[in-house]
Image (cartoon, rainbow, N blue to C red):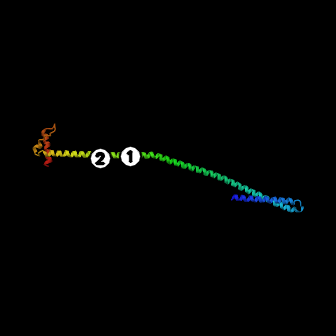
Amino acid sequence: MDIHKILELENENVQLRSELRSLYEELDQKSTDQKLLEENNSLRQEILQLNQKLQQSEQQKQSITLKLMDQQELNIKLSKTIINLQSNINETQQNDIQNINQYAIQSNPNNNYMQQLQVLRQRYQNKNEIDSQNKDQEIQKLYVQLSELQKINNNNRLSRPLNKENMIKSQYRPRGISENKFNNFETNFTESRIFH
């Protein structure tokens, strides 16, 4: 809009200058005639008015030109600011990408450690299960052996006659214990199991 105004003022100035030249020429032609002095004076007044209009138009043109220059300078500053902001955005994005990559690189060892820990836990769990199975098997074997020993012991007891004389005269008396004391103990023990 300001540019159009400048163009209009420029055209108006050109017209004013043209009118001034024509008036000066007309004045020169009529200056020799004394009868036309009054007309010359009116022409001079008109010339002065036109000069004033021309000056006003020039001032407006200059003011608008200065505004345009200021606007252009402001546009340049804004462009620089936009360029700087875009550059900062690009740097920030690059830094974000680098940080993401660095985090990914740092997280990989952590993932590896977690995987190794899971493997170790699995191995430990498997080892514990194997150890537990082995112990269960050993316990089962011991139970079998104990059962067999109990059967043998029961068979030995059943193979001996259960008369009182044989129960009293035991041939398994420990050393250091008198025969009477052992016989009394064995008799009491046997009677408590059989007769009660």
User: Tag 1: Cα neighbours inside 10 Å, few (<14), some, or many (≥20)?
Assistant: few
**What residue lies at 47% left-to-right and 47% top-to-bottom?**
104
Where residue 117 sits: x, y (%)?
39, 45
Q: Is residue 61 visible?
A: yes
The residue furthest top is 176
* Image quarter of residue 27: bottom right
Residue drawn at x 12%, y 39% is 179
Give me the residue at 13% from left, 48% from top. Answer: 194
Compared across the picture, whether 187 is left or right of 137 comes to left
- Quarter of the image for the N terminus: give it: bottom right
Left or right, 81 with reference to 153: right
Callout 2, which amino acid? Gln
The answer for how far apart the CA atoms under marks 2 and 1 are is 21 Å
Comes first in the chain, label 2 or label 1: 1
Q: Is residue 48 visible?
A: no
Residue that mark 2 sits on: 133
Q: Which residue is mark 1?
A: 119
Dot 2: element? helix
- Where residue 64 appears, as percent x and y from the top left, is 71, 56
